[in-house]
Amino acid sequence: MAYGRAGITDATPFSSPRTERAHRISPLRGSSARQIGSTSARALLCRIPRSRHGVRGRGPECWPMLWLRSAFFALLLPGSVLLWVPLWISTQTGGTFELGAARWIGLPVLIVGAGGLLWCIWDFGRRGQGTLAPVDPPRFVVRTGLYRVVRNPMYLSVLIALGGEALLVRSSWLIVWAAIVATAFHVFVVAYEEPALRRQFGSPYEAYCRAVSRWLPRRPSS
């Protein structure tokens, strides 16, 4: 469920074994790299090109694979919360309530939530050069876009979309599911994610927490 990691800078590298291995592979660059024409060498270069920040990251030729992985993990992780479990709930349980035409209020709410989720996934890929999955995280932490106004916009977008779904299908059990998901998100963020980020980044992350709210969006100070 860990797919909404907040950040403190636009280009702070994650300290991961994958990044450390990329730093150790130094001969394949410049003229030496151009002399290698094999498919395997091009694949290796695709995995470890140098970014404009001096840190090896993904090159433009790798973006299609990055977006394919992002789509896969989006269907697997938030897709489970927003699609697969609600589909099972709506087909296996009753508990509907009458809203009349007011149910259609859920449609724009759902669109807003889904749009926010897609925006975060885009920033994770474009800015962070990674996906929302813990096994394929961004190489750079992200605080652009929605992360400037709230620390956990991906989690919040999922909850907004889930609330829109509950209104649209008039399911009281989906409201219960949304409450369970919201509680799980909050416990995970408070008990694990934020302490881990404080240990990793220290005072800069503390300053970010003071400037940006955990759950309530507000206008950035600068």
Image (spheres, rainbow, N blue to C red):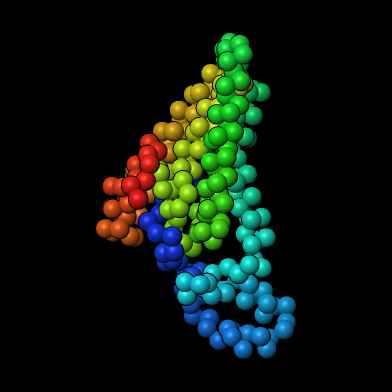
Percent x, y for residue 54?
Answer: 47, 75
Whether residue 35 sits left or right of residue 158 in the image: it is right
Residue at 50% of width from left, 32% of height from top?
160
Whether residue 55 sits left or right of residue 206 in the image: it is right
Percent x, y for residue 94?
Answer: 61, 16
Residue at 53% of width from left, 41% of height from top?
116
Image: 100 above or below 190? above
Residue at 35% of width from left, 55% of height from top?
197
Q: Is residue 136 visible?
A: no
Residue at 49% of width from left, 63% of height from top?
139
Count the numbered circles shown: 0
Percent x, y for residue 219?
Answer: 38, 41
Image: 204 above or below 110? below
**Quadrant hosting residue 202:** bottom left
Q: Which is more toward the observer, 60 or 97?
A: 60
Image: 106 above or below 143? above
Q: Which is more toward the observer, 132 or 10?
A: 10
Image: 83 above or below 21? above
Whether residue 158 sits left or right of residue 107 in the image: it is left
Q: Is residue 160 visible?
A: yes
Percent x, y for residue 24?
Answer: 49, 80
